[in-house]
Image: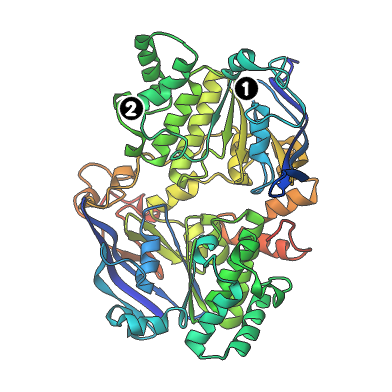
Amino acid sequence: MALLEVSDLKTHFFTRDGVVRAVDGVSLAVEAGRTLGIVGESGCGKSVTALSIMRLLPTPPARIVSGSIRFDGRDLTSLSERELEDVRGREIGMVFQDPMTALNPTLTIGTQIVEVLQRHFGLDRRPARRRAGELLAEVGIPRAHERLDDYPHRFSGGMRQRVGIAMAIACEPRLLIADEPTTALDVTVQAQVLDLLDDLRRERRMAMLLITHNMGVVAESADDVAVMYAGQIVEQAPAAELFSRPEHPYTEALLSALPDLEDLEARRSRLTAIPGRPPDLVDPPAACRFAARCPFAERGDCCVLEPPALRELRPGHWIRSAHPASERHLSPV
Amino acid sequence: MTPPLLTVGDLKVHFPIRSGLLFDRTVGHVKAVDGVSFEIAEGRTLGLVGESGSGKSTTAYAALQLLRPTAGSVRFDGRELTALRGEALRQIRRQMQIVFQDPHASLNPRMTVGRIVAEPLQAHGIGTRRSRRASVARLLELVGFDPSYTNRYPHEFSGGQRQRIGIARALALNPKLIVCDEPVSALDVSIQAQILNLLKDLQRDLGLSYLFIAHDLAVVRAMSDTIAVMHEGRLVEQGPADDVYLRPQSEYTRALLAAVPVADPERMQQRKAERRRPKAAPGRA
């Protein structure tokens, strides 16, 4: 059994303008010691998925309307807030996108890390402080023990993200959820932070759920990849397979819309844009959600009449489309 | 050969660091731009890359005289801009426009799309109300924005559509040079490609020159003829795009290129191994 198993998760937002189906039937599993990357564009529901797992969404307007989230056999959706507090930070760590807003600007970072250790391990101040210094050293902050008394604004963006990571791993969680952990960082710093996360995961046999909009970041760090579109996972496969043999028209389109750093013809050629935009999640089409932008969906196809089911095309390669790349030579479905 | 459209020579922008409660004293300078030189030929694109704080945007603002440079020269279309003041500067600015990064912050939320795009024309007293309305429709059509929406407000549109409005506004005065300051970094990949293609098409059709600023090296490569790499206020490398990408000369450019994640796990493994082998990448973490 996987460490984290999410099945048929539906998280909806009840707003004045209607019910926004931000996450609409997501199932995924993260095995111990492995990294699952969730990629997708803004509004596809990847962050809401992460926040649902941690039960960190404001209720109302958000509500998990159905589905289960099993972590190590326990269903997180049925835990009380009190019980959840023992899971958050302790068993599931979280790294957020913006290291400036994720840290409290009025407390020294030492105080903030010590707080976590005291809350979950009941350590005394002195050993907790020593441990906090070790953690900062472990995430590569120079003169770690001296820097415990500094406030967050004294750190650069990359260093602040390292502090955030130190806090997230302080209690040796078995799962780390990283939501766009490098989006606010420059590329050289991003590379360092991704390397750090990778090392930590290996050393501690941590599982990781990596959420990002950046295809390069998943290609670099994830073992398995789930592509999300309009609240649903539309394709999922091991990373090497997904990038070498993408099946879903959306995944293919995303990959070809990316400018290639090593393309000699890049200046002279045009990029392959995806026409249109994602559907409104208040009233999503009762069909394939990508159909309106899909180059293969034609009028009268079953995928424009009813939503295609998620099916396993090859072992471990799941897809939600009537027109996977490997079936296109066949007669239309 | 025709002379370049824009020539920037030894440009410096230093900001004073002030201290003291009663008496303002200058205790030092931040050398945001410190001796930058480059040229942009007509119809060509110079890509300016570098990490945050390297001075890319300040360089562009100083070139447009939106910020007065501390020293150096900026020649545009044969005229020295740093010496120009008042009306003369205003007139030449028509030739140089800018597209900003954030399509949310750079459009006035209380103006309709039509007024936003017409504003440059109005400010320079070009045309009548009626002819301006026709110009707006033509401009919007040019950037692929439905002209029937001219009476709507920016918040009613997505990021990509808003960026089209910003581009239409930049085109209103028929400029020769457009500074694109991170024009797609707030956009999703699928929309980013639409906007980059639009910028390419406009350049081809209108013969525009671009100073294209971005931190995404793959995006810059797709847009630029020449590349300048900026680091801590200076250009550490400059040359034809293929040279810079294939045979980077400076250590900094090499590290920058090695750090870019590419969407291919196999290539990524190699890049990662290479990256980890030599000394740590520069740039503060």
Find residue A79 and report its image quarter.
bottom left
Q: Name which residue lies at 60% across and 65% down.
A: A152
- Residue on which the image places disc 2: B146
Residue A3 place in picture, x, y as percent:
42, 81
Residue type indicated by callout 1: Gly
Nearer the observer, disc 1 or disc 2?
2
Total number of numbered discs in the rendering: 2
Residue closest to the eye, A224 or B249: B249
Distance between the Cα atoms at labels 1 and 2?
27 Å
- Residue B72 in percent (x, y) is at 78, 28
Give the residue type that dot 2 points to. Answer: Asp
Mark nearer the N terminus (1 vs 2): 1
Along the viewing direction, whichever of B244 and A281 lies nearer the viewer:
A281
Q: Quadrant of residue B264?
A: bottom right
- Residue where numbered disc 1 is placed: B43
Q: Residue at x 55, y 23 (%)?
A: B204
Q: Is residue A204 visible?
A: yes
Q: On the picture, is A55 further left or further right than B7?
A: left
Tell me the subunit letter for badge 2: B
Asked whether the residues under the numbered discs 1 and 2 touch, taking CB atoms below 8 Å apart as contact, a structural biologist would say: no
Give residue B209's mark: none
Q: Position of residue A62 (x, y in %)?
A: 28, 64
Left or right placement of residue B128 versus residue A129 in this view: left
Name the colouring of the figure.
rainbow
Q: In terms of secondary structure, where does tag 2 sit? A: loop
Q: Are marks 1 and 2 on the same chain?
A: yes
User: Percent x, y for residue A70?
Assistant: 34, 80
Name the foreground residue: B9 vs A196: B9
Question: Which quadrant is the N terminus of chain A positioned in?
Answer: bottom left
